[in-house]
């Protein structure tokens, strides 16, 4: 399967997506404000779980998804840092604490989005200043595109 990048989204649809993840982004920023820069990734992940719970946002930590190949569920699995379940489409969250994100980190998130068919992915880098760097992506299953929003 080849996925292309789409450069723009319909402005109204983009606004809907922004609203959809607004609370999640707020929780991420709260964690960033409370913890100093330079902590290991697993510290931010654990704090994010506490923050989701306090905010009343259900989140599955280290969620495992078994891909399907030719109708067979594989024993191997994808393990995402967090998945926020929602009937309109689950949101994958990948936490990083790196000086710079590379294509490897983006590809990891995109692979999770394609493998799970979850439409929204967020990659957050806590090793940035003056706020956490948050990238949000939408996967359109109909035209096989991933678009930043």
Image: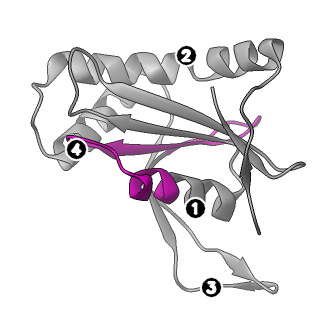
The image quadrant where one finds the N terminus is bottom right
Circle 4 crowding by C-alpha within 10 Å: few under 14, some 14–19, many from 20: some
**Which residue, given by chain and number where applicable, does mark 2 sit on?**
22
Q: Looking at the picture, how far across and down is residue 24, in whole percent?
A: 49, 24
Is residue 101 rendered to the left or right of residue 36? right
Q: In this rendering, is residue 24 above or below 68?
A: above
**Which residue, given by chain and number where applicable, does mark 1 sit on?**
111
| Residue pictured at 67% horizontal, 59% vertical | 114
Mark 2 element type = helix
Mark with earlier residue (4, 3): 3
In this rendering, does residue 40 appear at all?
Answer: yes
Circle 2 crowding by C-alpha within 10 Å: few under 14, some 14–19, many from 20: few
Circle 3 crowding by C-alpha within 10 Å: few under 14, some 14–19, many from 20: few
Q: For residue 98, what is the image quadrant?
A: top left
Q: Is 90 in the magenta?
A: yes
Mark 1 element type = helix
Q: Which of the pair 60/90 is nearer the observer?
A: 90
Is residue 68 rendered to the left or right of residue 18? right
Q: Which residues are magenta?
A: 83-108
In this rendering, does residue 54 appear at all?
Answer: no
**Which residue, given by chain and number where applicable, does mark 4 sit on?**
98
Distance between the Cα atoms at labels 3 and 1?
Answer: 16 Å
Q: Is 55 in the magenta?
A: no
**Which residue, given by chain and number where applicable, does mark 3 sit on?**
74
Circle 1 crowding by C-alpha within 10 Å: few under 14, some 14–19, many from 20: few
Mark 4 element type = loop
Distance between the Cα atoms at labels 4 and 2?
Answer: 24 Å
Mark 3 element type = loop
| Residue pictured at 81% horizontal, 84% vertical | 71
| Residue pictured at 78% horizontal, 25% vertical | 9
């Amino acid at each position: 399967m080849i996925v292309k990048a789409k450069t723009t989204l319909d402005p109204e649809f983009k606004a809907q997506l922004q609203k959809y993840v607004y609370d999640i982004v707020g929780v991420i920023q709260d964690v960033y404000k409370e913890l100093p820069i330079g902590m290991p990734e697993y510290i931010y992940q654990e704090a994010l779980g506490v923050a989701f719970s306090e905010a009343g946002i259900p989140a599955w930590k280290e969620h495992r998804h078994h891909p399907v190949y030719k109708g067979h569920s594989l024993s191997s699995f994808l393990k995402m840092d967090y998945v926020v379940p929602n009937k309109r489409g689950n949101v994958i969250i990948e936490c990083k604490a790196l000086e710079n994100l590379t294509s490897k980190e983006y590809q990891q998130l995109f692979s999770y989005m394609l493998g799970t068919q979850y439409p929204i992915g967020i990659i957050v880098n806590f090793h940035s200043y003056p706020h956490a760097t948050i990238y949000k992506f939408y996967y359109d299953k109909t035209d096989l595109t991933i678009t930043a929003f």
